Amino acid sequence: MTTPVTIQFVDTDVESIADAPGRVIAFLGGDGKMGIAARRVDRLTRGALKRVAASDAFARLKPGEGLELAFPAGLAASALQVIRLDRKDDITAARKAGALIGRSLGRDGALVLADAVTRAAELSFGLALRAYQFIDRKTTKGEEFGAVTLMVNGPEAVAAEAAPLAALAEGIFFTRDLVNEPANILTTDDFAARLAAMQELGLEVEILEEEQLAELGMGALLGVGMGSASPTKVVVMHWNGGGEEAPLALVGKGVVFDTGGISIKPAAGMEDMTMDMGGAGTVAGVMRTLALRKAKANVVGLVGLVENMPGSRAQRPGDVVTSMKGDTIEVINTDAEGRLLLADVLWYAQERFQPVAMIDLATLTGAVIVALGFENTGVFSNDDALCEAFLAAAKAEGEGAWRLPMGDAYDAALKSRVADMRNVGGGRAGSSLVAAQFLKRFVKDEVPWIHLDIAGTAALKGDWAFGPKGATGWGVLALNRLIRDRFEG
C-alpha cells in the first residue's frame, strides 16, 4: 500500500532555517503580515518576502495559492515557496495550501514554517493527500517524497489534532491504490485478501464464496460473474465501536473489470474499466479509516466482488435471473451489471444486519457523467433527513455531491414482459434515475437509504487539487464525517 509522506511537527527554531535543505515554505497574510519564521526568512533573503507581498502577482493570489523563488539567496534551500494564507482562512484554504506544497514535494523533503498558521493540522492533511503517487507497478520508481517538517506553535497539540486526519489519509490512499490497480493484479481473490488483512487493525472480516452465495439465493450477483474464471465473492467487514445499537451499512460495487459482458463495450477506453470497483474501494477505505481512528460507531461494510467477462458461460441478454429477495429480473443489457450485484448485497445487508441506515456506492452509469460531469456525485435517497446530513458532510469536506430526483415515472421504465422487472429502462433518457429506481426495489420501505453514483468522481483523467490523475478516493471524507457527526455516540 502507498504510505503517506512522513510529517513531523516541531517547535519553531528560526536558527535552523538558513541551512534547511530541500524546499522551504513561508506564509504571508493577504495584508503582507508575517509570522516569526517568515520574518527570519525575509531577513535572510534581504527583503524577498516583502517584495513578494508588494507585488501584483501576490495580490492576484487567492487563499491557499502561492509563488515560488528558485535557489533563494541567503538560504541553502533549492526553492522558497511563498503561500498566501490568513489566520482567519477556513479549512478549505488550509488544505489547498497544503496540497500546493505536496504537489511540488521532492526527494529532499520540505521545511514548512507554519508558526503563524491557525489550521496547521488541516494544512498537513492537504499536503499528505496531494503527495500521492501510484508507482507499485513501475520498475523505475522515479523521485520519492522526502520527509516534511512543520514548525508550529505547540507541536504536541497540533500532532494530536492531525492524528485522525492521518487515519483519513491512509484510508483514502487505500481506496486510491485499489482503484488504480490493474485488473490482472486486483482479481477478486486478491481484493478479498487485502480486505481480510485489515483484521490486524481490529476489523472482523468474512468472505462469502460462491457456494454460500448460491445457498443464499444471490442469483442476480452470481449471474454477473458467470463468464469469468475469477470467483464471485462477497466480503463483509465489521467495525463494532459503538455498543449494542444496529449498524450503519455501507455497500459497494466491486466489479474488478467490466467488459460489458455479452453486451460488450467499445474497445476505446475499455482499459479504464479497472476502476469499476470504485464503490467497493471507497467502502474499504472508510472501514480502514474507522478502524485506524477507533471510531465509536457500529458500521458494517459489504462489497460484492465480481468480474464481468464475455465467456462461454456468460449470461445473455434476455436471460432471467432470480434475486435473493425472490424477484425475477430480465437481463436486457449485461453491461448494466452493477445494479444486479447491488440488488443482492443490499438485500443481504438488510436481512442479516437490520441496519439503522444504508448507503451504497457504485460507478453505476455513464449518464450521471453527462448530467453532472466530473465535479459531483449523483445522490439519490428515500430519506430527506439522512440525505441532507450526507450532503452537509460532503459540502464540509469539499466533495461535490448533488441530489437527483426519484419517482414512479422512472420506475415504470423497468416493466418487463417476462419477469418481475428488467435491469434497464427503455432508452438513455434519465437512465441514472431509472437505475436508482431499480435499486430502490431492493430497499425495504422502513430503511433510510442513499445511493451514490460515483461514475464521474471515482477517477479523473487529469491532475486535480488534491491528487494526480487517476483514483480520487471520493467519498471517504464525506462518509467518515457523516459517521462522526451522526452515528458516533
Image (cartoon, rainbow, N blue to C red):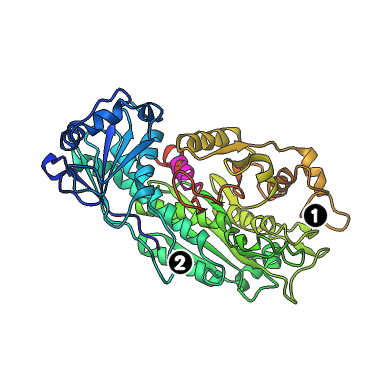
**Number of other residues with Cα within 10 Å of mark 2, as a class: few under 14, some 14 to 19, many 20 or more:** some
Q: Nearer the viewer, residue 466 or 19?
A: 19
Residue 304 lies left or right of residue 28; in this view the side is right
Furthest residue to the top?
A: 31
271 in relation to 32, above or below: below
Mark 1: which secondary structure?
strand
159 in relation to 33, above or below: below
Between discs 2 and 1, the one toward the N terminus = 2
Amino acid carrying mark 2 in the image: Arg
Q: Which residues are magenta?
A: 475-482
Which residue is depicted at the point 39% across and 34% down? 93
Q: Which residue is mark 1?
A: 422
Amino acid carrying mark 1 in the image: Arg
Q: Is residue 477 magenta?
A: yes
> Residue 83's x, y, as percent?
32, 35
Q: Which mark is residue 79?
A: none
Q: Nearer the viewer, residue 179 or 247?
A: 179
Q: Which dot, 2 or 1, sits closer to the camera?
A: 2
Which residue is depicted at the point 44% across and 46% down? 466
Q: Quadrant of residue 95?
A: top left
Q: Which residue is mark 2?
A: 194
**Number of other residues with Cα within 10 Å of mark 1, as a class: few under 14, some 14 to 19, many 20 or more:** many
